[in-house]
Amino acid sequence: MPTRTFAAATLTAMTLTACTSSALDPPGGAPPALSAGAAVELARIEGLAIEQPAWEAGGSNWSVTLSWPEPEGFRVDHYRVVRDGVTIAGEVSGTSFRDDDVRPDTRHSYRVIGAGPAGESTRPAVENVRTGQPPLPEARLEGTFALRMTVWSATGTQSPVRGGASSHSFEPRCREGACSVRWSMRTARAEGLLRRDGAVYSARLSTPLFIRNCFGRVVDEAVAVRLRVRAAAAFGHEWRATRIEGRIDEESSYAGCGTAAIVWKVRGPLQV
């Protein structure tokens, strides 16, 4: 019984071979026909361009625009746009797409795939981009910063002066964007208006700071503040300062006491 089964299988194979061969076949048999899937594999979107605007601090134009040519030899029903592995638009009818869900100074990888009416797809067009950012001087200075205060120089003080960390708060005097700010330090009772000049905020103030007079009292001093925004980031659709540095000079001169002065170097990040 096993012998007859083997013979039947062999005969069937020989019959099939005879039916699919001809005198016109090249040596080795006929080449395999291209399937629909194999033909689609050859379709490709040649090139993906990404354009960016001049990034503004207000966030109204934070976007990138993708554009691409139609693939040759392939009828497209729609396109699919993928950002960082996630489809962000699945039914794009034209050959461009504006992505409004982006932030400054961020890396993204985009893929655009053409889809045919029967569900077939092209090879993807791929491009990477790093988004731009608004100018640093346009960052809004707001919130509380943890500043490290280092003694640059000290004269006329009766005891050694040591540095440390302190919290500095900044309250903008406008509803949006970069502008002058109200500066304050709760621990030192210091406060005053700092005027903005680009990325620099400065003022000469009469306010208490760290020096006490020879009677042990905290009194108003001559305080010069000069701070510069060094880094910024997006908070929602607002461009805000995240790191500042600069110096604070204080000088105390009180009747019956000597003059004391301290120059502080300060730098630190926004507390979030």
Image (cartoon, rainbow, N blue to C red):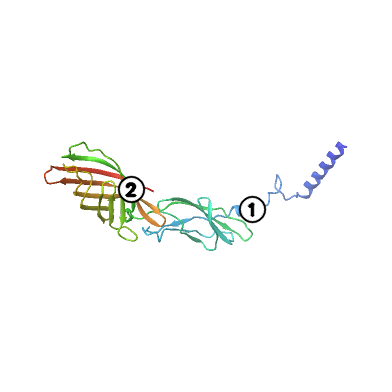
Name which of mark 1 and mark 2 comes first in the sequence: 1
Could you tell me how many numbered marks the image carries?
A: 2
Whether label 1 touches label 2, CB < 8 Å: no
Q: Position of residue 11 (x, y in %)?
A: 83, 43
Quarter holding the N terminus?
Answer: top right
Residue 134 figure quarter: bottom left
Q: Residue at x 82, y 45 (%)?
A: 12
Q: Position of residue 136 (x, y in %)?
A: 32, 53
Front residue of 127 and 86: 86
Front residue of 253 and 198: 253
Give the crowd class for mark 2: few <14, some 14-19, many >=20 residues within 10 Å: many
Q: Amino acid at mark 1?
A: Gly
Residue furthest bottom in the image = 93
Query: Going by the image, does 5 lie left or right of 49?
Result: right
Q: Secondary structure at mark 1?
A: helix
Give the crowd class for mark 1: few <14, some 14-19, many >=20 residues within 10 Å: few
Q: Secondary structure at mark 2?
A: strand
Front residue of 143 and 160: 160
> Which labelled disc corresponds to residue 204?
none
Q: Residue at x 61, y 54 (%)?
A: 40
The residue beneath circle 2 is 145
Separation (CA) of disc 1 from disc 2: 59 Å
Disc 1 vs disc 2: which is toward the camera?
A: 2
Q: Position of residue 150 (x, y in %)?
A: 26, 40
Residue furthest left in the image = 256
Q: Residue at x 17, y 46 (%)?
A: 251
Q: Amino acid at mark 2?
A: Phe
Residue furthest right in the image = 1
> Which labelled disc corresponds to residue 37?
1
Q: Position of residue 216 (x, y in %)?
A: 19, 42
Q: Residue at x 25, y 43 (%)?
A: 265
Q: Is residue 71 visible?
A: no
